[in-house]
Amino acid sequence: MKVGLVQVFSCPEDAVRKLAAEVAELIRSRASQGFMTVLGLATGNTPLPFYRELIRLHREEGLSFETVATFNLDEYLGLDRDHPESYWTFMHRNLFDHLDVSPENIHLPSGRLRDEEIEAHCAAYERAIREAGGIDFQLLGIGRTGHIGFNEPGSSKSSRTRRIHLDPITREDAASSFGGLDHVPTHAITMGCGTILEARRIVLLAWGGHKAAIVKEAVEGTVNDQVSASFLQEHPNACFYLDRGAAEALD
Ligand code: PGA
């Protein structure tokens, strides 16, 4: 395993404290030089303690997000923005509503697109990331299929923002929040692996023994498109922040 690829913490709170301090330092040092900071953000249960820590830093330590622009990894297709399970709703409820980030600096793919609009929408998303100067810091979780964003098995290392068919395992994992498998969207818009890997710094978070097997494949397995998180092994500045449970299968 590459040196520095993995850091193991005794609990998620310790991991997110360290990570949030890194991100706060990045935001402050770029702001002091007159630059915006571009954050790539993720949804799911995993980032919640990290978002709580960012909110605490904003409230208690005066960390401002006025110089931050955000790009989320993905969004379900077929959901309106204000659907309770949309990632737009998730991000506002769990992070943006509690910070001083400007609404015009917040970017998520749209979940309401006609088929003929998808290609142009995805190209515009890629262009917006480029025009913002690229992603300084990218946060990731990992799904049981090994996906980062919604890059399900078979997603190439050079894939870009596009429509993806969700893996049955991914839909099954989302079923309880949607009140049943039938209500889980079948497709999403996701940044591609190539889009993600252009970020200058990447940290993947994983907590709990239920993630241990896929984390082992991503970290110690061969780099391959059946586990898109394995591509992080080849990134010059990517790291897996794990709690003991998620790390328990590693050699
Ligand atoms: P989770 O999802 O954080 O809810 O476990 C992770 C993912 O699917 O990327």
Image (cartoon, rainbow, N blue to C red):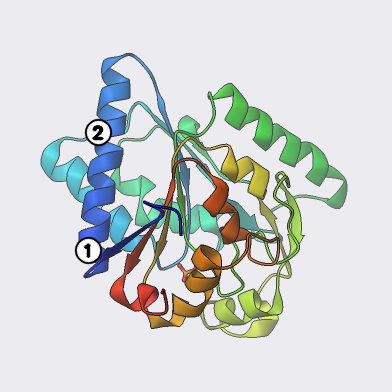
Q: Position of residue 207 (x, y in %)?
A: 36, 71
Q: Looking at the rendered structure, which numbered label has been put on residue 25?
A: 2
Q: Are marks 1 and 2 in contact (CB under 8 Å)?
A: no
Q: In the picture provided, is 115 more to the left or to the right than 229?
A: right
10 Å crowding of disc 1: few (<14), some (14-19), many (20+):
some
Q: In the picture provided, is 113 more to the left or to the right than 133?
A: right
**Residue at 47% in and 61% down:** 141
- The amino acid type, in three-letter code, at marker 1 is Glu
Report whether residue 90 is seen.
Answer: yes
Tell me the SS state at disc 2. helix
Q: Looking at the rendered structure, which numbered label has been put on residue 155?
A: none
**Residue at 21% in and 70% down:** 10
Q: Position of residue 21 (x, y in %)?
A: 22, 43
What residue would you read off at disc 1?
A: 13
Q: Position of residue 202 (x, y in %)?
A: 45, 46
Rendered view: 35 above or below 27? above
10 Å crowding of disc 2: few (<14), some (14-19), many (20+):
few
Tell me the SS state at disc 1. helix
Rendered view: 28 above or below 182? above
- The amino acid type, in three-letter code, at marker 2 is Glu
Q: Dividing the image into 4 quarters, which one contains the C terminus?
A: bottom left
Q: In the picture provided, is 231 more to the left or to the right than 93?
A: right
Rendered view: 70 above or below 175? above
Q: In the picture provided, is 241 more to the left or to the right than 52?
A: right
